[in-house]
Amino acid sequence: MVCLGNICRSPLAEGILKSKVNAEQVMVTSAGTAAYHIGKGPDIRSVKVAKEHGIDIRLQKARQFKAADFEVYDYIFVMDQANFDNVVSLASTEKEKEKVQLILNEISPAMNSEVPDPYYGGEDGFKNVYDMLDLACDAINKKISI
Ligand code: 4NP
């Protein structure tokens, strides 16, 4: 799960998908394309909306996406087009590029919709992001379930 700062959207996406999958079969992590917040915990507003849904994301620590992640993960879900462009620019093969997908295309294929950046807005923005990610993670869970 990849966003810009790895403190608002992708920590929520990580927590939500982890709450749905079998941890023995699926490894879920998140990262940011930027380095601003490396080592920090999730934004308090993401922590709050996750908690309201019974999900604890407080132990996550922000990290930056790196090219080696392409070797580890089968799917790389990005929140918006800027994340998409930044992650794809680190890919070294077509196969790696194909791993990168806008997460909302899992619910509306090829619409290229974006999960809006809630950082500069209020708590409603985080609720909206949560609802979008919950739907997308349901679709991802169905897709990857064995
Ligand atoms: P995120 O949100 O990409 O969903 O983690 C942001 C967090 C921090 C900043 C921008 C977006 N920032 O500019 O510091």
Image: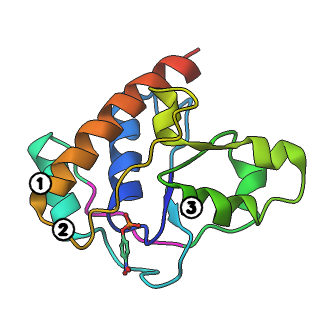
Quadrant in which ligand 1 is drawn:
bottom left
Residue located farthest toward the bottom when viewing the structure as drawn: 36
Residue 121 shows which numbered tag? Answer: 2
Contact, mark 1 vs mark 2 (Cβ under 8 Å) = yes
Ligand 1 within 8 angstroms of badge 3 C-beta: yes
Give the percent coordinates (x, y) of residue 109.
Answer: 54, 26
SS at mark 1?
A: helix
Which quarter of the figure is the C terminus placed in? top right
Amino acid bearing label 3: Asn
Marks 2 and 3, Cα distance to the nearest angstrom? 19 Å
Disc 2 vs disc 3: Cβ atoms closer than 8 Å?
A: no
Numbered range of the magenta stretch: 57-63
Query: Is disc 2 surrounded by few (<14), some (14 to 19) or many (20+) residues within 10 Å?
Result: few
Query: Can you identify the residue that label 3 sits on?
Result: 83
Q: Is mark 2 within 8 Å of ligand 1?
A: no
Scheme of image coloration: rainbow
From mark 1 to mark 3, how far is it between C-alphas? Answer: 22 Å
Query: Is 100 drawn above or below residue 20 in the view shown?
Result: below
Label 1 sits on residue: 124
Q: Position of residue 85 (x, y in %)?
A: 66, 61
Q: Position of residue 22 (x, y in %)?
A: 45, 27
The residue depicted at 57 percent of the width and 73 percent of the height is 64
Q: In the structure shown, which secondary structural element does the residue marked by tag 2 occupy?
A: loop
Q: Amino acid at mark 1?
A: Asp
Q: Position of residue 46 (x, y in %)?
A: 22, 59
- Residue drawn 34% across and 40% down? 133
